[in-house]
Amino acid sequence: KAQMEKECLIMSFAYLERLLKRTHGRLVLKASNWRAIVLSCMILASKVYDDLSMWNADFSKICPSFTLKRINELEVSLLEAIKYEVRVSSSQYAKYYFQLRAMRSALGLAPESAPAAPPKPHHHHRPRCNTLAPA
């Protein structure tokens, strides 16, 4: 069973917005592409935040509709589109954290557990590009 840290999900929103801004409206979320875009943002967030992130081969097993080759392509495309700017500042993180809390409240959803609070400073490293991940 795979599990992603709550902080990674919040960071994914930051990457998604960064991607949409950097593409200046050329990239539009549609029924045909949103899954690939969101998955690539989630994978990147996991690699940046988690000390022990999964390999791309693991992600392709969890999401069998995406081959390892496709996940590798998505990862490289995302990194190039955001110009390898993977750092999410604490103020950016807090922005998405509070937006998600407000959305949850507006929808009348009771939290099962509170979403991840803005994290304490965490070491940031360049993401691993796992294009040679074991199959």
Image (cartoon, rainbow, N blue to C red):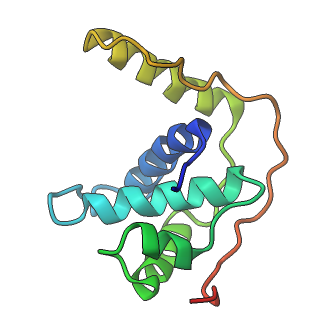
Residue 10, percent from left and from top: 52, 37
Q: Residue at x 80, y 59 (%)?
A: 125
Left-right relation of 103 to 119: left
Which residue is most to the left?
31
Residue 130, percent from left and from top: 64, 80
Q: Residue at x 34, y 10 (%)?
A: 105
Residue 79, percent from left and from top: 56, 69
64 to 54, vertically: above or below: below
3 to 68, vertically: above or below: above
Q: Is residue 52 visible?
A: yes
The foreground one among 91 and 125 is 125
Residue 101, percent from left and from top: 44, 17
Image quadrant in which the C terminus is located: bottom right
Q: Residue at x 51, y 73 (%)?
A: 75
Q: Residue at x 62, y 73 (%)?
A: 55
Which residue is most to the front?
1
